[in-house]
Amino acid sequence: MKEKITIVKVGGAVVEDELQLSQLLRDFSAIEGRKVLVHGGGRKATKMAERLGIETTMVNGRRITDAAMLEVVTMVYGGLVNKNLVARLQANAVNALGLTGADADAIRSHKRPTLVVDGSPVDYGYVGDVDRADGQMLSRLIEAGITPVMAPLTHDGEGHILNTNADTIASETAKALAPFYDVTLIFSFEKKGVLRNPDDDDSVIPVITHADFERYKADGTISGGMLPKIENALSAVDAGVGRVIITLATAIDGQHGTAIVKN
């Protein structure tokens, strides 16, 4: 029987909220056994870009990344956010190691081609779509007692850093580790789960399947940044990840929130 591993993805809004972040790091540190932390940081990147006079553009919850924005996200994600999380986990007796996809060739991607969105071509710029994640390398680190802390940056193998959605990093990391472990993937953020009504924090949808997702997407119940989150969650369960849950950052015990299942 495979050993269990828990992968927790923490969103940018939680990274910005000191109370929520402190609680999440304590809860994450208390998780027994093997674990991985994946982080976003989009709100902090947006604030830094604003300070530098760089405009932020989003399409369907995904950031357009030109050359100037790529410098911002590399600094914020790979430096400021990642290393602060690593330091704080060390203070909680977790032997953490911060990684981008370029480190040890952990996650390789290709530059996203121009896509048609709502009838118009969209060039996302320096955004990476993942080709592969190295589960074997990550498992070696984990078996050595190291807890990877993954930043939402990848590389193309040709010397270029690419901005990559943090939910995608979490999903691809989970899929890469699924052959080695019994994986639970938890997407944690500032809500209790996926909500039927964004104005009602208690309107949590308990279970979402592929069919449910298509229906909720069509009627507008699910939109914006939640779209790539659920797409990545469904991709993970399709690839053999044991459990996927979307939940509140202060409830990462796997007992609350929205479960994403095949059917």
Image (cartoon, rainbow, N blue to C red):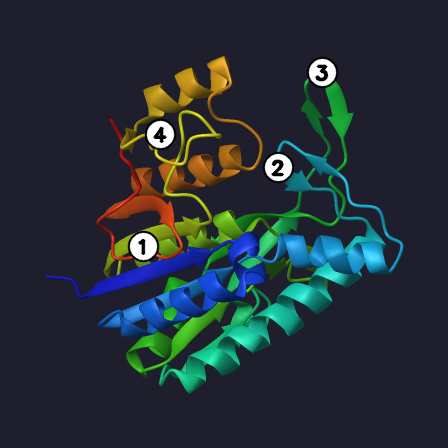
Residue to which mark 3 is pinned:
119
Q: Are marks 3 and 4 in contact (CB under 8 Å)?
A: no
Q: Secondary structure at mark 1?
A: loop
Q: Secondary structure at mark 3?
A: loop
- Find the distance from the CA under tag 3 to the CA under tag 4: 33 Å
Q: Is residue 61 left or right of residue 181?
A: right
Residue 86 visible in this rendered orientation of the protein = yes
Residue to which mark 2 is pinned:
61
Q: Amino acid at mark 4?
A: Ser
Q: Nearer the viewer, residue 138 or 52?
A: 52
Residue to which mark 4 is pinned:
203
Q: Amino acid at mark 1?
A: Ala
Q: How many marks?
A: 4
Q: Are marks 1 and 4 in contact (CB under 8 Å)?
A: no
Q: Secondary structure at mark 2?
A: loop
Q: Is residue 116 left or right of residue 251?
A: right
Q: Amino acid at mark 3?
A: Gly
Q: Are marks 3 and 2 in contact (CB under 8 Å)?
A: no
**Which quadrant of the figure contains the N terminus?**
bottom left
Residue to which mark 1 is pinned:
251
